[in-house]
């Protein structure tokens, strides 16, 4: 693997990785590779990174026999209940295998024909993510504070929740608004979700809380997938102050109809030509944890290469669908819109580009798990498998309209929203102060927040993971 580059990689002569890096995959190697299982944690992590990059290169170049051999090698080291690197590698290797299987649609469909993904399971895992990690709590806190400040003095408030599955956010807002010195406003929430049962539960919980606090309240349920939303059903009325909350929703609109054609026309990107520097940096790292291997990329000089940068789609709005949706929201004349998105670059046009970027961001998320939740936790396993694992699979294995997890960086969302007619509203110091206190309550040094252009970015150490930004309708 990578014979062209192995001579330039600086490794300890006693490291098993040096021997491994010069081995060419061959069916004659056999399996299992017992020596792989004897590696120390640090050496195992380096080997897994090397193997994942190697496997992705084979998949991208169509060398499926070699990809199969490398996947077998990964299976000797990866584990969904091991350390951070082992867990992450298990899901990345599964995603690469799934991408290979998609070359045989009949086989892929047959193997997945009995798989049932219940919406209730998706809601459950989102609730577990909300409970185990602070990211959504911080996003809800910042959103609510922005709404409170924007709606000061308003007597009729209408909030549109683009994914109404978690009542905790609006329960907290109802409690705050009910105690306003000038008296509570009349409050209406329009919740959008594809499951009627979810909206019924939301309506019951919020109505119950509003009645307890004597706050005039209405809940307007809209049963619909977001991409099929009929704007008229939002029932926005003249005279009410409108706020829109979008939590991890807008990136799914970035798929465009011609993505498949674009993918077919673009040349395949191999690691040898474009990413040797990245591989070399990874192999030269000498840290003992996944976070140290990947998250501190600024220390190790990681940045997208010119080749990778030039292969990205143009930095315009990029998708007719997201432009159209944002224009429709702008047409509602909201007084405020708060957007929470993953702050990662997972929307590259090539497999290798997406693999490199997603390794960095998911390394941080798996490190969060390792630092804050027990390895034996069933809840942790569910979040990693059903949320992180499914996102990784979508990023790595899917193309075209099927690829929904198209996370992009905050600067792209700023550009996109600005072009759609929205002006940035700086998030308040008061909200940021409470959010920092919330993070400190986790008794973990890794969680951090930083301000960028009036927006808040939530990080694990130096790795940005989620951004929260507030916007007003600019006429």
Image (cartoon, rainbow, N blue to C red):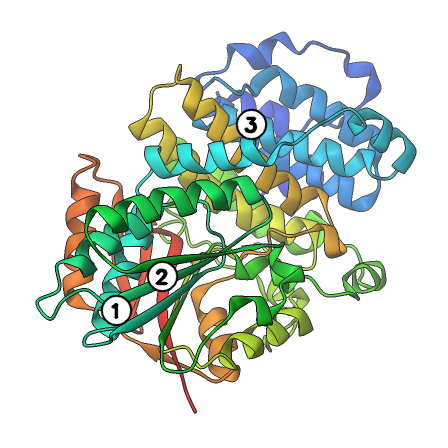
| Cα separation between marks 1 and 3 | 43 Å
**Badge count:** 3
Q: Residues within 10 Å of mark 2 (few under 14, many from 20)?
A: many
**Where, quadrant-wise, is the N terminus in this rendering?**
top right
First in sequence: mark 1 or mark 2? 1
Which residue in the protein does label 3 denote?
47
- Percent position (x, y) of residue 33? 66, 11
Report x, y in % for residue 390.
60, 37
Q: Are marks 1 and 2 in contact (CB under 8 Å)?
A: yes
Query: What SS does tag 1 mark?
Result: loop
Secondary structure of residue under mark 3: helix
Return the residue at label 1: 427
Residue 184 is left or right of residue 4, and the answer is left
In the picture of the structure, the residue carrying the numbered disc 2 is 468
Nearest the eye: 275 or 472: 472
Tell me the residue at 52%/82% (across/down).
331
Instruction: Report if residue 115 is visible in the image.
Output: yes
Q: Secondary structure at mark 2?
A: strand
Work out whether 40 lies above or below 2: above
Rendered location of residue 133, percent (x, y) = 33, 38
Rendered residue at 25%/49% (across/down): 211
Q: Residues within 10 Å of mark 1 (few under 14, many from 20)?
A: many
In the image, residue 330 above or below residue 308: below
> For this rendering, which residue is in front, 255 or 115?
115
Disc marking residue 474: none
Give the residue drawn at x 53%, y 21%.
Answer: 80
């Amino acid at each position: 693997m990578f014979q062209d580059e192995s001579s330039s990689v600086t490794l300890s002569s006693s490291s098993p990785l040096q021997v491994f890096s010069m081995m060419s995959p061959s069916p004659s190697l056999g399996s299992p590779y017992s020596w792989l299982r004897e590696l120390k944690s640090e050496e195992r992590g380096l080997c897994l990174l090397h193997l994942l990059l190697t496997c992705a290169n084979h998949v991208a170049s169509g060398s499926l026999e070699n990809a199969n051999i490398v996947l077998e090698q990964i299976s000797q080291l990866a584990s969904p209940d091991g350390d951070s690197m082992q867990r992450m590698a298990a899901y990345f290797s599964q995603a690469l295998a799934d991408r290979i299987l998609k070359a045989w649609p009949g086989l892929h469909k047959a193997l997945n024909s009995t798989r049932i993904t219940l919406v209730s399971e998706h809601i459950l895992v989102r609730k577990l993510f909300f409970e185990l990690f602070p990211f959504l709590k911080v996003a809800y806190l910042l959103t609510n504070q922005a709404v409170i400040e924007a709606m000061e003095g308003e007597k009729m408030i209408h909030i549109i929740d683009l994914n109404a599955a978690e009542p905790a956010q609006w329960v907290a807002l109802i409690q705050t608004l009910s105690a306003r010195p000038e008296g509570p406003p009349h409050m209406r929430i329009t919740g959008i979700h594809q499951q009627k049962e979810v909206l019924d539960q939301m309506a019951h919980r919020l109505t119950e809380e509003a009645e307890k606090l004597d706050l005039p309240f209405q809940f307007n349920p809209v049963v619909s997938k977001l991409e099929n939303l009929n704007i008229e059903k939002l029932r926005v009325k003249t005279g009410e102050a409108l706020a829109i909350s979008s939590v991890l929703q807008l990136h799914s609109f970035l798929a465009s109809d011609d993505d498949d054609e674009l993918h077919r026309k673009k040349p395949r990107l191999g690691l040898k030509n474009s990413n040797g520097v990245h591989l070399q940096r990874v192999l030269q790292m000498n840290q003992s944890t996944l976070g140290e291997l990947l998250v501190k990329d600024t220390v190790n000089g990681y940045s997208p290469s010119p080749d990778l940068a030039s292969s990205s789609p143009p930095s315009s709005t990029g998708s007719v669908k997201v432009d159209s949706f944002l224009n429709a929201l702008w047409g509602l004349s909201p007084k405020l819109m708060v957007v929470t998105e993953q702050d990662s670059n997972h929307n590259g046009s090539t497999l290798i580009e997406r693999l490199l970027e997603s390794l960095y961001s998911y390394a941080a998320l798996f490190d969060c798990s390792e630092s804050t939740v027990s390895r034996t936790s069933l809840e942790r396993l569910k979040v990693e498998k059903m949320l992180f694992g499914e996102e990784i699979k979508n990023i790595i294995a899917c193309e075209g309209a099927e690829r929904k997890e198209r996370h992009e960086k905050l600067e792209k969302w700023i550009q996109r929203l600005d072009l759609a007619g929205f002006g940035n509203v700086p998030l308040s110091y008061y909200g940021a102060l409470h959010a920092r206190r919330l993070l400190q309550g986790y008794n973990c040094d890794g969680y951090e927040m930083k301000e960028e252009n009036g927006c808040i970015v939530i990080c694990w150490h130096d790795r940005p993971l989620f951004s929260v930004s507030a916007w007003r309708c600019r006429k």
